[in-house]
Amino acid sequence: MNQHPFEKRIKNTLERMDFHDVRVVVDSQGIATLSGSVADANERALVVALVRTTSGITGIANQIGLTQ
């Protein structure tokens, strides 16, 4: 399966923000599926907001869990 062009951009952004345990897969329709874990609900909301502001993302399936 080929990586969607937006995936790499989102992954780089998440890495720079120290969200190393979050995975993202973008389908051909621009839907980003987020999985993995973050420390708390505030971090989860920040990840979703970061992805939502990515040009070309049409929707988000949030499957991120909390470690605390």
Image (spheres, rainbow, N blue to C red):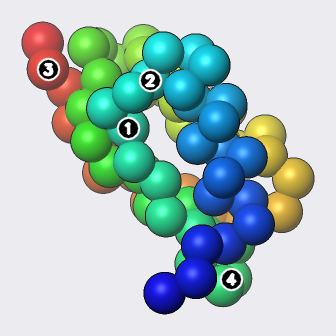
Eye-nearest disc, 3 or 1: 1
> Does residue 54 appear left or right of residue 48 in this picture?
right
- Tag 4: residue type? Gln
Mark 1, residue position: 22
Among the two numbered marks 4 and 1 on one chain, the one whose residue lies closer to the N terminus: 1
- Tag 3: residue type? Thr
Eye-nearest disc, 2 or 4: 2
Among the two numbered marks 3 and 2 on one chain, the one whose residue lies closer to the N terminus: 2
Q: For this rendering, which residue is in front, 68 or 11?
A: 11
Measured Cα–Cα span from mark 3 to mark 2 = 13 Å
Mark 2, residue position: 19
> Does residue 48 appear left or right of residue 6 in this picture?
left
- Callout 1: 10 Å neighbours few (<14), some, many (20+)? some
Q: Which quadrant would residue 60 be assigned to in this image?
A: bottom right
- Local SS, label 2: loop
> Does residue 50 appear left or right of residue 25 in this picture?
right
Q: Which disc is residue 29 wearing?
A: 4
Mark 1 touches mark 2? (CB < 8 Å): yes
